[in-house]
Amino acid sequence: MPTTNAQQAIENEDTPVIQIEGLVKQYAGAEIPSIKDFSLTCHAGEIVGLLGHNGAGKSTTLKCLTGMLPFNSGSIKINGYDITTSPVKAKFTFGFVSDKHDVFVKMTGLQYINFMADAYNVSKELRAERFEKYDELFGLGNRLKEPISNYSHGMRQKVCMMGSLMHNPKLWILDEPMIGLDPLTSEKVANFMKEYAAEGNCILFSSHNVHSVQKICNRAVVINKGVKTDDFRFEDFDSMAGSLEEFFLARTTENKYTDDSEQGEEN
């Protein structure tokens, strides 16, 4: 049975948190792959921004990473566990926040958080401690007693974040996490991400917002039409070559969709 503590599931602290090798994903009926020979390695302590225009393949990459989508070839390991052959062990070590929050809407926020804590075998003592911490961070207060169907997009984002953190995952994966959050919460979440990574965890989030990635992340991975074009740490980024936004625009092609499922979405 999987461990109740995501941290204890890591057998070797030197094991990469994320190890993607040669990932290829092609949807049925599509003429070309949505993801082409994509490789990525991330380690504890890193905050990595997956940066790309809408339809670049960010959400598809994250869905393959989390086991939500099968892929055609390549391999994915999370904290040493293969997502295909050991999916339960892998999933116990990460938390995922999708850009879609239209599930469990009949639950109250509190019921959803307890549901997530139950799913990851979080003890009553730990869940109470973490609930207090994250309730202060996200500030939903008494609204947690209401059905999620009453929530705005931003509120659903907050409660999903709370639920995904209840088991203290070694890896936190988020798809466009800042969309719908008010400025104050965005600032709090950004600061929390830095603290969480400093504790030895890893964060990977997708975004098409250059400024959010540069503000929060210590590393950026640029994806364009399903291909990784760049992978660099911000401390190595040559600002003399221009701003990150100018660099990003020069390296990508806007409004060129490769994944029909992503057209029109904020991903």
Image (spheres, helix red, strand yellow):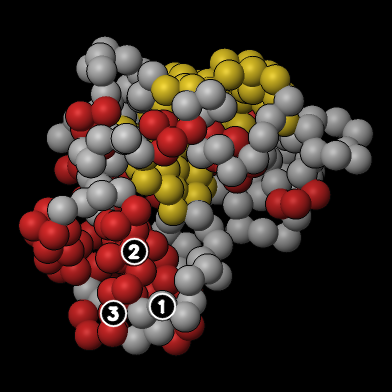
Residue 28 sits above or below residue 227 on the image: below
Number of other residues with Cα within 10 Å of mark 1, as a class: few under 14, some 14 to 19, many 20 or more? some
In the displayed structure, does residue 42 sit left or right of residue 70? Answer: left
Question: Viewer-nearest of labels 1 and 3?
Answer: 1
Residue 124 sits above or below residue 149 on the image: above
User: Which percent across, then down, holds residue 258?
Assistant: 79, 40
Q: Give 97 or 58, whichever is nearer the viewer.
A: 97
- For marks 1 and 2, the one nearer the N-term is 1
Which residue sits at x=36%, y=69%? 112
Q: Mark 3 highlights which residue? A: 144
- For marks 1 and 3, the one nearer the N-term is 1
Residue type pointed to by label 1: Met
Q: Mark 1 highlights which residue? A: 107
Q: Mark 2 highlights which residue? A: 115
User: Which percent across, then down, holds residue 134?
Assistant: 19, 62
Let me know if residue 261 appears in the view: yes
Which residue sits at x=36%, y=79%? 108
Residue 48 sits above or below residue 231 on the image: below
In the displayed structure, does residue 4 sit left or right of residue 149? Answer: left
Q: Any mark on residue 65, and which?
A: none
User: Which percent across, then down, holds residue 92?
Assistant: 35, 39
Residues under numbered marks 1 and 2 in contact, where contact means CB atoms less than 8 Å apart: yes
Q: CA distance from mark 3 to mark 2?
A: 13 Å
